Image (cartoon, rainbow, N blue to C red):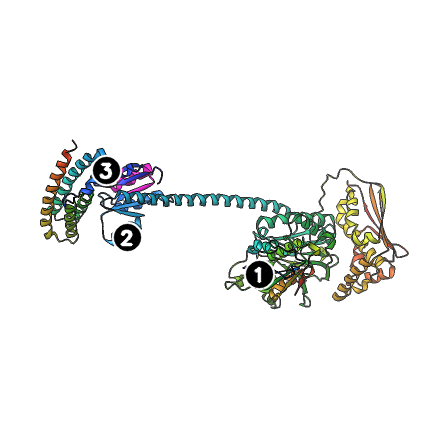
Amino acid sequence: MPARLTILIAEDSPADRMLLSTIVSRQGHRVLTASNGLEAVGMFGQERPQLVLMDALMPVMDGFEAARRIKDLAGEALVPIIFLTSLSESEALARCLEVGDDFLGKPYNAVILQAKITAMDRLRRLQQTVLQQRDLIARHNEHLLNEQRVAKAVFDKVAHSGCLSAANIRFLQSPFALFNGDILLAAFNPSGDMHVLLGDFTGHGLPAAIGAMPLAEVFYGMTAKGFPMMEILREMNAKLKRILPVGVFCCATMLSLSFQRQLVEVWNGGLPDGHLLRTATGERVALVSRHLPLGVLEPEAFNASCEVQPLQPGDRIFLLSDGVLETRDSHDRQLGEERLLQVFSGGHAPEQLFDEIQRALADFRGEAQDDVSMIELCMVDEAALVRPPLLFSDSGQSSLLDWSADFEFRGEALKRFNPMPFLLQLLMEVRELRARGGALYAVMSELYSNALEHGVLGLDSALKSDAQGFAHYYRERDQRLQALQEGFVRFGLELMPQGAGGCLRIRVQDSGCGFATDSVCAASCVSDSLSGRGLRLVRQLADHFQLLADGSGAIVEFRWTAQA
Amino acid sequence: MAITALPSGDGEELIIHIQGRFDFSAHQEFRDAYERVNVTPQRYVVDLQHATYLDSSALGMLLLLRDHAGGDQARISLVNCNPDVRKILSISNFEQLFKIA
Amino acid sequence: MSDPHLDQSVRNSLLEVMGEEYPVLLDTYLFDSEERRRQIHAAMDDGDALALRLAAHSFKGSCSNMGALLLAGLCWQLEEVARRELLDQAPALIEQVDREFAIVRILLKSERQRYR
């Protein structure tokens, strides 16, 4: 039995109207009456009854027209209209059901009328519930979208401290990338190297986005401090392992491009092959995933070892997210690696490849891609890139002058610890050195790697004469470093005031002969060799350079005069 | 997608068969398969012969199984992998954590 | 007891539904019926088949509600004739309707008397 309803009765015969009124009000409802269609529509607009009993044939405006208008006024809500009719033709009855919801014949049967009112009211309330739930869902959806917008805004602030707009980068990233779990980061480190990370978190939506933020913070923070790639990888893995639930991880490829040394270090854990194209030979080198994704292994088990590849200016590296290979066409076939490789071997000019890949994706899919991430990096000459100035978090008012410090890093320390960020942080406390921060980083890194690789590990830079030798060299380096028991690298830092300015003197010494005259000179004479660049650069950047007589070290100086 | 789990006669091994798409929708079923058994197996075998599709959530689920089975002490084999499945496992280097046949 | 002019079971359920208002219903019907008959005659005089049809249809409805089944049947026939625009057949039916209504009116008026 429905609750008390307000029911409108539109019937032009007074006796019938009276009879029906009485029947309905005795059933407990509030009754409104109208004697023609026009009155009925007016009454409806004013009183908004829940149900209408409508005579089909009335003067002024007939029942069908009145019913149509009432339905219009009702909008989304269901106001059941029961036609009152003694029409017997099927067509007429069908018309009643087209415009209205039911019909009742004459003579009126009170029992049947009550049953119909009950049934119609059930439908009315069902419609009401549907609309309420729809509105509730819409509101919730709006909340969710809003939360996502906020999350994205926060993330964008973190993510955009990078250098994706550098001249040697082209990239494609969906606006929904964050919520697909895709992340693309790029930043210069203080020595001018470029770190790049393409990541793909498992899952979608906010959970995928949440892992991206700490990852970006570690990437940008440590890159800015000059930490080497391997340590950044270790820290990113450890962080994700710590905070993400089991089963959630981030497939990633990380690169470190050195424009000074014209090489790239690569680490790929779980993403499809990256592609390195050598423009001179047309050779394509696959950058294969050799590691588990980030966030899976405990720190002790994590392997941060990278591949190193030499590069010439013009060589290009392409990294693509999973989404590219998973792209499906209208027949649900996957794009796959084959298709992509066809683009690479399709004889296109290197600078066209990025567009060609995009075109291949669009052609295949039949529409523009909006859920893939792709980045192209080009090796360029050192001078070709504009680096942003180093940022410091203090006001630089206090100054650290007139001091000296000596450090010795031995066997175990050399294996597991890169002292560069630590030493450089110390030096950046000297306000006057900040303007030459970039050069300082570059010089210190070069001296350190020279001391370690040639002095302590005894590696011969002549090996780095071609790409193959290059790979061999770095493998040897890893092996020898793993096996290292003894040896040391010493840094002596001395900061002295000099006249109106000052001087930083750095003395580097290793336990071997990393700076032996013959190898250094030989290397620096071969101006195009892959190995000669390092120390030549040091000479260029420092104000003074001097080798120690026994070949075990070098001294460099940076001088400055007071600002006018 | 259907997942069935059968313990071996001696209860030492649990064999989980995956049929159909092994993706996020299989999450609860997969967990139930290895959590709701009366035995405590020493070894697990995941049979992927009839698995038509594997994505990163499936990899995540395998990691959950590994965690349940003792982490580094777990002994889990992934068997009857078709070339597509093998490819995905190879790119993610999962053979470093699971025995793959 | 079935009465062809006024069905008693209909009358009983009307009485039950209307209660005290029963006499008012009778009055309303009688008054309205005069109007319907006038409309029928006017439509016939104008030769307006549609108006005749609508008036007959309406009258049929209220008659059936009151239990005047014979009268309702005659109205239905009149409605059909008007629908097919066979106006030459209408006058005979209208005459029958008038006669039947005369009987129904007498019966209802005497019924009405019982409730004064």
- Find the magenta span and give its range: A33-53
- Specify which label sits upstream in the sequence, 1 or 2: 2
Estimate the x, y position of residue A370 in percent, counting from the top left.
55, 55
Task: Locate residue B57, reporting x and y percent.
Answer: 60, 56
The quarter in which the N terminus of chain A is drawn is: top left
Depth check: give the residue in front, A389 or A58. Answer: A58
Please give the residue where the numbered disc 1 appears in the rendered image. A326
Q: Which mark is residue A94?
A: 2
Q: Do the residues at pointers 1 and 2 share their chain?
A: yes
Q: Is residue A79 visible?
A: no
Measured from the top left, where is residue B47 in percent x and y?
Answer: 61, 63
From the image, state whether disc 3 or disc 1 is nearer to you: 3
- Labels 3 and 1 share a subunit: no
Q: Secondary structure at mark 2?
A: helix
Q: Is residue A166 left or right of residue A396?
A: left
Examine the rendered structure and indicate whether residue B100 appears above or below residue A541. below
Q: Chain of mark 1?
A: A
**Chain designation of label 3:** C
Whether residue A459 is visible here, answered yes or no, is yes
Q: Residues within 10 Å of mark 2 (few under 14, many from 20)?
A: few
Residue A361 part of the magenta segment = no
Q: Is residue A41 magenta?
A: yes
- Give the number of the disc on residue C16: 3
Tell me which corner region of the image, top left, top right, bottom left or bottom right, holds residue A456: bottom right
Residues at circles 1 and 2 in contact by the CB criterion of under 8 Å: no
Closest to the observer, A431 or A42 = A42
Give the residue drawn at x 32%, y 43%: A117
- Mark 1 residue type: Glu
Q: CA distance from mark 2 to mark 3?
A: 33 Å
* Image location (x, y in percent) of residue A234: 72, 52
Residue A136 disc label: none
